[in-house]
Amino acid sequence: MTSPTNYIPIFLMLFIALGFVLTTMLASHWLGPKRKSRIKNDSFECGIQSQGNARLPFSVKYFLVAILFVIFDIEVIFMYPWAVNFRSLGLFGVIEVFTFILLLLVGFIYLIKRNGLQWGD
Amino acid sequence: MVAFLFLCGVGLLLMLLEALKWRKIVPFFLTGSVLMAYVLSVLEWKDKFNIGFFENMIGFDKPAIAFSSVIIISFFIWLFAFMDTYKNKEGMSEIFILALFSVCGALMLTSFRHMASFFIGLEIMSIPLYVLAASAKNKVESNEAGFKYLIMGSFFSAVILFGLALMYGATGSFEFVQIKTQVKMFPEKIPAFFHAGLILLLIGMLFKASLFPFHFWAPDVYEGAPTPVTAFMSTIVKTSVMAAAFRLFSFSFNMFHENLEQILLWSIVLTLLVSNITAAVQTNVKRLMAYSSISHSAFLFMIIYVNIKNNISINTLMFYTLAYSVASLGFFAVLNYIAGYEEKSLDVFKGLAYRNKFVAFTVLICLLSMAGIPLTAGFFAKYYVLTLLGVSGNWTLLVLAVIASLIGVYYYLRIIILMYFKEPANSDYLEVSDNFKTALFISSLLIILFGIAPAVIFEIFKV
């Protein structure tokens, strides 16, 4: 049966893990040499000099495509277990999966008709 | 069940209608379908109690149908009240489709029997709401409201999920009925973390119903969201969350009352005090209504609190949600009609009675109902709650509830005084459209009908 004492190993592990991380971090902080210069503080970009700010606004279309990709990717993922169990599920499985595809198809039609996939203006 | 599937199908069809450029018929089609769904849901009333669908995930027993009816009626009034705001505008169909999908999730929340259907219902209801809250795209406040709601809502969804996971780990079952029997048969075998899971679940539900100390999101989100969405959140969403909380805590886990009672009691007491006192000093009308809505949540949770121990009545909860939803929709409809997105001061109601007598009278009825003045539905809703508290012997809570309603009367009367005894800023006659008039007529009629003959609803929906 579970009782609070059963968790002692977990807490022990937690303490050891935290202690190890803290010790190494503090040790490297205290023991390591420190030399600071402007070039050393720059962000490292494979030896090429970095240019400009990384926080640029970029087109919302990338985001849209990423989200849409997730939805249809998930659709395909759901088909794998169906394909593996195709025989044992039989007609029931076919109906269920086609209902699922139909639901996503409505979304897909909506997407195309609302120009969701059009890249230009 | 038929009504639920029907509404889901209608949502898909509306998406196709919008895509195929038949946008014009969307409002008519939607209104007709909602009416049809109401008929379908009432027709199921005579059905047997315990038919479960989808491997016993969803079951439309009598309480579920009663709450579904309240939700569908509210959605019907909502459509009429806010039709003109969106009609023939860019993004009209999106708003209606998202609201419809949210209603589908709400119906699922009234009828779940399985942890999965509970959580999926909660998410189907919430995710369209996050989008709806941010639907005034070019207003910063609306975006902020949507973002805040998304972050807080997903965080507390995670809390609920963690609670469900702990409970599953403790009992090895996803179905609420099975968990209940298992706990009843072998109470000594239930590990301690089951109770932790139950409390996490309670905390999640308290957040969704915006009770103290999890209420801080409500005023900000209610204020930032467009008024139609605020109305949607404070009526349909609240009804479904209450139905879900009732099913969870009064049906499924009522044997753990000693765990839940103290938390609920303190939460309710503090909500009553904090929300009413804060509402009394508000000058922003939407924040005022948000705090008023939080205070009504406390009243609704009182029913659940009493029912946890001695399972008396579900009708009281249903009557209260119906009375509150109808009054709230009427009020928000008028607010949306007379004030733009930026105008949030209480002064928008100044001298409304001089500009249009009918509209002002409807607001009067709605506010009196929310305050709980006799001859309105709100009076009987409060009366039944207080009776319930008296019968079960919770005298301290009863006294506090009465004091809270008295403070409530003060801030509702402020708006009434502004409407009837102050000169309007511009005294032009306020033109009203037919849809808007219909919504106001239905809501005020229902309030007065249930205020004069509350037994009607108890006879129709005898659970």
Image (tube, grey):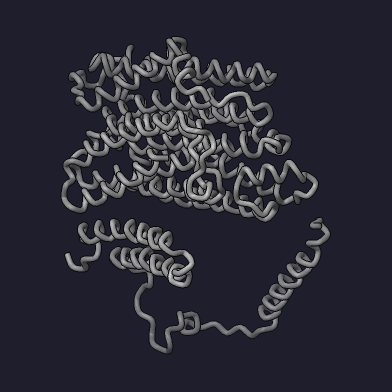
**Is A18 drawn above or below residue B248 in the view shown?**
below
Quarter of the view holding residue B390: top right
Figure label count: 0
| Of residues B52 and B319, the one drawn nearer to the viewer in this rendering | B52
Expressed as whole percent of the image width and height from the top left, the position of residue B171 reads 69, 51
**Is B416 drawn above or below residue A31 in the view shown?**
above
Expressed as whole percent of the image width and height from the top left, the position of residue B330 reads 34, 25
Residue under the point 35% across and 29% down: B332
Quarter of the view holding residue A56: bottom left
**Is B318 drawn above or below residue B159 in the view shown?**
above
Tell whether B156 sits left or right of B224: right
Expressed as whole percent of the image width and height from the top left, the position of residue B81 reads 29, 30
Expressed as whole percent of the image width and height from the top left, the position of residue B239 reads 47, 33
| Of residues A18 and B76, the one drawn nearer to the viewer in this rendering | B76
Determine the residue located farthest toward the right in the rendered image: A5
Please indicate, yes or no, whether residue B142 appears anywhere in the rendered image. Answer: no
Residue under the point 37% across and 19% down: B446
**Is B447 drawn above or below residue B314 in the view shown?**
above
Tell whether A74 sits left or right of B442: right
Please indicate, yes or no, whether residue A90 appears anywhere in the rendered image. Answer: yes
| Of residues B209 and B461, the one drawn nearer to the viewer in this rendering | B461
| Of residues B235 and B409, the one drawn nearer to the viewer in this rendering | B235
